[in-house]
């Protein structure tokens, strides 16, 4: 089978990190027990082979970090490694300077690497950011060469506060068809501070999968927004599939450095690459999407 690699130019990922592919790989799926070791190894290597050179993981993603180390450590210089810390370190209280240091050391050990390109504080509130010594501990890992750049993953007022501290080089936040609040507020601030932006949930959890409201499902808020925005009309007028419209919108939103998509399928990974290779949406379609959100925005906050 012939595989088409990612053809978009590399993008800046902020201070302390060189560049990243426009499409990143969200490595949450590979942490689950439903995926075999062989499947995880094949998927990770296929991503890098296709030019998807940013791998995003976290302490909370099951076996993800361990499998990245097992299957990609031999080609460490071929990709940018992003992880998250602050919690779930055996023997340490969550969200303490000690857990930060120990969490970075554990991540280095599990991923069999001497350095991590970007280490993010994972969705903690501003009260946690204000804990004495917490960010200092993360900055210390940069001085010792264990981490190249630090950042924050989160949404809304907590993310705004994190940016106001001017201590982070990278942020990770939701940017998709149904979560656009940050496009006009967060992203311009990130640009002013030369901060890289990792767009998570570019497919918006794919709420179009459900004909009826998916009560209790993670994507229920996005399903409601999708219908309120009458997004199906824009999809029909564009002539594009839902996933293509969503992924190209997020990936090519101004100031987004990379958009991370998780999958357990090499076929879906290839499709994601091919969709991004088509480039940005037309300005007309982008404006329709933006107008649909701003017109119907009922104080829609970013989904955590």
Image: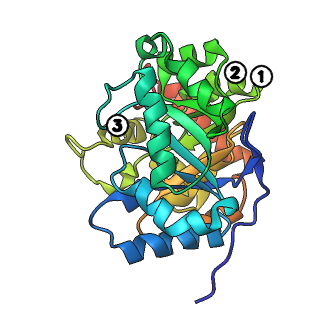
Q: Are marks 2 and 3 in contact (CB under 8 Å)?
A: no
SS state under label 2? helix
**Which residue corresponds to the image point at 49% horizontal and 60% vertical from the top-left?**
69
Label 1 – label 2 distance at C-alpha:
5 Å
**Which residue corresponds to the image point at 57% horizontal and 62% vertical from the top-left?**
240
Label 2 – label 3 distance at C-alpha:
33 Å
Query: In terms of image quadrants, where is residue 34?
Result: bottom left
Q: Which residue is mark 3?
A: 89
The percent position of residue 189, horizontal first and vertical second, equals 70, 21
- Out of 59 and 247, give the one closest to the viewer: 59
Disc sitting over residue 82 in the figure: none
N-term mark: 3 or 1: 3
Q: Is the residue 35 above or below the residue 203 in the image?
A: below
Label 3 – label 1 distance at C-alpha:
35 Å
**Which residue corresponds to the image point at 49% horizontal and 71% vertical from the top-left?**
43
Please tell me how crowded label 1 is: few (under 14), some (14-19), or many (20+) other residues with Cα within 10 Å.
few
Pair 3/1: label in front: 3
Q: Which residue is mark 1?
A: 192
Q: Is the residue 176 above or below the residue 209 in the image?
A: above
Pair 2/3: label in front: 3
- Out of 189 and 278, give the one closest to the viewer: 189
SS state under label 1? helix
């Amino acid at each position: 089978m012939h595989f088409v690699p990612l053809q978009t130019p590399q993008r800046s990922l902020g201070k302390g990190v060189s560049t990243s592919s426009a499409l990143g790989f969200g490595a949450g799926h590979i942490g689950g027990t439903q995926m075999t070791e062989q499947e995880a190894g094949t998927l990770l290597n296929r991503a890098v082979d296709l030019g998807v050179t940013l791998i995003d993981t976290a302490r909370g993603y099951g076996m993800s970090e361990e499998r990245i180390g097992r299957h990609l450590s031999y080609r460490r210089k071929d990709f940018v490694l992003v992880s998250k810390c602050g919690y779930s370190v055996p023997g340490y209280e969550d969200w303490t300077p000690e857990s930060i240091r120990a969490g970075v050391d554990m991540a280095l050990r599990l991923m069999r690497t001497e350095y991590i390109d970007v280490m993010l504080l994972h969705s903690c509130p501003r009260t946690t950011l204000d804990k004495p010594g917490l960010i200092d501990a993360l900055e210390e890992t940069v001085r010792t060469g264990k981490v190249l750049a630090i950042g924050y993953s989160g949404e809304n007022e907590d993310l705004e506060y994190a940016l106001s501290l001017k201590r982070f080089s990278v942020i990770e936040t939701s940017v998709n068809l149904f979560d656009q609040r940050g496009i006009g507020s967060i992203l311009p601030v990130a640009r002013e501070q030369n901060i890289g932006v990792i767009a998570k949930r570019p497919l918006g959890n794919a709420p179009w999968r459900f004909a009826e409201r998916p009560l209790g499902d993670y994507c229920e808020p996005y399903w409601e927004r999708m219908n309120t925005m009458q997004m199906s009309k824009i999809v029909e007028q564009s002539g594009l599939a839902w996933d293509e419209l969503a992924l190209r919108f997020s990936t090519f939103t101004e100031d987004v450095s990379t958009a991370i998509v998780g999958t357990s399928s090499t076929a879906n990974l290839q499709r994601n690459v091919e969709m991004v290779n088509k480039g940005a949406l037309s300005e007309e379609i982008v404006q329709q999407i933006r107008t649909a959100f701003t017109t119907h925005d009922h104080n829609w906050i970013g989904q955590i």
